[in-house]
Image: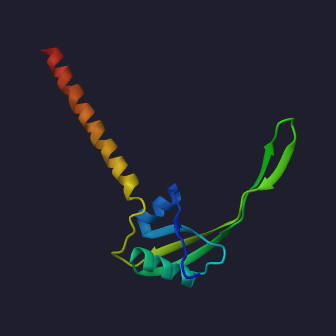
Amino acid sequence: MNSMTLKPRMSEKAYGLSQSSATYVFEVPADANKLTVASAVSKQFKVKVKSVNIANIKGKPKRSVRRGGRVSQGSRSDSKHAYVTLMPDNEIPVFAVEEEKAEKAAKLQENLAKRSAKAAKKESK
């Protein structure tokens, strides 16, 4: 358990938690515990961890229909999520790329609106 790989969970709930309460969600191995997750986050991202909560998520049952009409039943794999809350003034740039994309899209919309306004002025003259 010396080298734990932390995979950030990219979902709307995880994004909302990171924005409102500085809580980040990671998918962790099944044998991880709170202490190992806290030390891995602090080493990997160089931040101070306030608390860690862990949730074991049971896989949902699934059915798939194969060729010939046969139905096979199975389930998604189980997973474990760690909710890591950081100390104040600490943050992890997990969603930085998503925010940059949103800012670029907003600037593009502004530029398009300005261009259309200029074109409308020219036509009215």
Q: Is residue 27 left or right of residue 103?
A: right
Q: Percent x, y for residue 37?
A: 54, 78
| 123 or 49: nearer the viewer | 49
**x and y percent of residue 65 in the render?**
81, 41
Percent coordinates x, y for residue 7 in the rendering:
53, 65
For the point 80% across and 54% down, which residue is it? 74
Which residue corresponds to the image point at 47% horizontal and 75% vertical from the top-left? 85
> Where is the C terminus found, in terms of image quarters?
top left
Q: Quadrant of the N terminus?
A: bottom right
Q: Residue at x 47, y 76 (%)?
A: 41
State the residue at coordinates (36%, 48%): 101
Left or right: where does residue 113 sit relative to residue 78? Answer: left
Residue 48: name its quadrant: bottom left
Q: Vertical placement of 18 versus 66: above or below?
A: below
Residue 87 versus residue 125 in the image, above or below = below
Residue positioned most to the bottom:
35
**Nearer to me, 46 or 121:** 46
